[in-house]
Image (cartoon, helix red, strand yellow):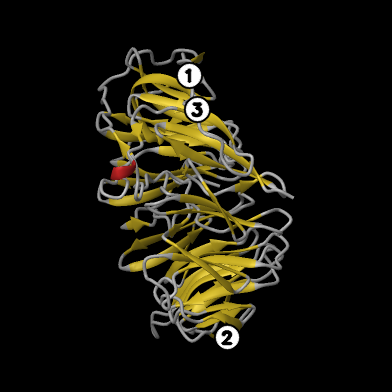
């Protein structure tokens, strides 16, 4: 899947020196053959005192632009570009004039976080920018390839074998896919590969209009094309289908495999890529409804939260104050805010604007904050357990609670990593592979904790990511200590 490239402000963070990007107007060395880049030696780590649960730390990098000043964490939040790999074992960062990955720093004249990416399997790393000597380059796995101009953004294919980028040519933005340059546009706003890495698409601004280019073929012009996090162009999981939402002539369209369908405002593919659901509106009644596999539902109005089950056999969505599962509607006593299927596709949980949480159709919580009832919910791998973070009306408004199997736990100032890094912050509770344990981190002005089930352990390192299990008892996360980023590994005792 495509990795998010949006830079997220680090909430409640530690500080970074101002980052300066030097813009180089021209690049020399076009057409030069690929060559390895020169890397600086890895830094020596600052010793970290022994931690809980057999804590083992491995230095991943020492970005000089990061400094940890605890007294300023809450009063002077800053921004920092940190990219964490999907398996949360690798980290890349940039101060605008260098790239740090796997503990090694490469000097650059200019580099942007929008031009850095890990592959889906975390094994491959790409960055682009202006190298020493004013050479515009794209670097994949340490091998440098000359770019056609100043690189503005770059993406890597899921298999890590291809890349695409956008470069500046006399004020125009030109996309390059598989080494072939397309036409120049005012801007290229979205760029992505299919899951099999064989197809590529992008959204571009042409004058005041927008177009979508798929496999080199340009669509007609639209007034707008959705490219935000909630709705953006997408390939199906099997890479055979491609769809997006566009507006033109006062109407909203879903364009699926090149065919326009009017009065449609959203789409979602099933996990296997073989099914598709569209969100639609009847222009006469103004009521919204769902179309699944070409079959329209009843016009219930207020439809949203469309989601297929993991096995792609079931489909659920919100319709006003009801949740609809496989076309059977159940009143929820409030607008449905989120819907989650269990891994085995047999259970469903949903939260409502009335502050209620339902699991398997039964109300399990009723005093949550109404507008944001559940921060995140996860089922265990065996689908028998569930856990979520929530705010409770009966408690202080300044804190999270962990709810495990319907039991409300202790209140914390914040549940999740202390900071919110680019593409890393997934505030879902983490179950062990055998479903026996739940692990999460908490953060407050006084202390940082790792919590295993209900047992708290004090940490002397600041988490930048949620824990990830490597076995039923071993897990890891990315942590920060002063200006050093570490891979932190722990083990739950028997």
Query: In terms of image quadrants, where is residue 462?
Result: top left
| Residue 282 drawn at (x, y percent) | 43, 80
Q: CA distance from mark 3 to mark 1?
A: 34 Å
**Residue 47 numbered tag:** 3
**Residue neighbourhood size for the residue with mark 1, other residues' Cα within 10 Å, grouped as few (<14), some (14–19), many (≥20):** many
Q: Name the residue beneath numbered marker 1.
A: 144
Q: CA distance from mark 2 to mark 3?
A: 57 Å
Nearest the eye: 129 or 360: 360
| Residue 150 drawn at (x, y percent) | 33, 26
Q: Residue at x 50, y 25 (%)?
A: 103
Q: Determine whether 493 is above or below 427 in the image.
A: above
Nearest the eye: 358 or 288: 358
Q: Secondary structure at mark 2?
A: strand
397 relative to 426 in the view: left or right: left
Q: Name the residue beneath numbered marker 2.
A: 330
Nearest the eye: 178 or 331: 331
């Amino acid at each position: 899947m495509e990795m998010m490239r949006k830079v997220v402000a680090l909430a409640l963070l530690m500080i970074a020196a101002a980052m300066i990007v030097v813009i180089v107007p021209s690049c020399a060395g076009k057409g030069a053959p690929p060559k390895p880049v020169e890397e600086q030696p890895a830094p020596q780590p600052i010793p970290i005192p022994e931690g809980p649960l057999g804590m083992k730390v491995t230095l991943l990098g020492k970005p000089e632009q990061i400094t940890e000043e605890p007294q300023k964490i809450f009063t002077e939040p800053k921004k920092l570009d940190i990219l964490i790999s999907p398996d949360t074992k690798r980290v890349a960062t940039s101060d605008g004039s260098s790239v740090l990955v796997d503990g090694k720093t490469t000097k650059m004249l200019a580099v942007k976080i929008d031009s850095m990416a890990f592959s889906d399997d975390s094994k491959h790393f790409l960055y682009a920018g202006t190298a020493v000597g004013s050479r515009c380059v794209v670097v994949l796995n340490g091998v440098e390839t000359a770019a056609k101009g100043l690189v503005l953004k770059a993406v890597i294919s899921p298999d890590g074998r291809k890349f695409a980028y956008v470069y500046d040519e006399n004020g125009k933005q030109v996309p390059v896919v598989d080494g072939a340059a397309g036409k120049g546009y005012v801007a290229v706003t979205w760029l992505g590969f299919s899951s099999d890495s064989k197809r590529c698409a992008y959204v571009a601004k042409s004058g005041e209009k927008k177009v979508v280019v798929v496999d080199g073929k340009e669509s007609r012009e639209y007034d707008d094309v959705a490219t935000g996090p909630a709705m953006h162009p997408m390939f199906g999981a099997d890479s055979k289908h491609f769809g997006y939402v566009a507006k033109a002539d006062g109407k909203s369209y879903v364009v699926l495999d090149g065919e326009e369908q009017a009065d449609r405002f959203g789409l979602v593919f099933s996990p296997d890529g073989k099914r598709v659901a569209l969100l639609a509106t009847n222009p006469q009644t103004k009521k919204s409804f769902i179309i699944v596999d070409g079959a329209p539902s009843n016009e219930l109005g207020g439809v949203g939260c469309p989601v297929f089950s993991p096995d792609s056999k079931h489909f659920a969505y919100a319709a006003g104050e009801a949740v609809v599962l496989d076309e059977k509607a159940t009143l929820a006593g409030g607008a449905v805010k989120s819907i989650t299927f269990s891994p085995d596709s047999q259970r469903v949980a949903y939260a409502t604007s009335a502050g209620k949480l339902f699991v398997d159709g039964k109300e399990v919580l009723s005093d949550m904050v109404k507008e944001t009832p559940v921060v995140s919910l996860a089922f265990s791998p065996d689908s028998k357990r569930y856990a979520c973070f929530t705010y409770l009306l009966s408690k202080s408004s300044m804190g999270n609670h962990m709810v495990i199997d319907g039991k409300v736990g202790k209140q914390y100032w914040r549940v999740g990593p202390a900071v919110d890094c680019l593409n890393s912050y997934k505030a879902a509770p983490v179950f062990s592979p055998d479903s026996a344990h739940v692990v999460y981190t908490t953060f407050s002005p006084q202390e940082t904790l790792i919590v295993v089930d209900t047992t708290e352990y004090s940490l002397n390192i600041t988490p930048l990511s949620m824990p990830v299990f490597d076995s039923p008892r071993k897990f890891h996360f990315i942590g920060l200590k002063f200006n050093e980023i570490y891979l932190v590994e722990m083990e739950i005792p028997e």
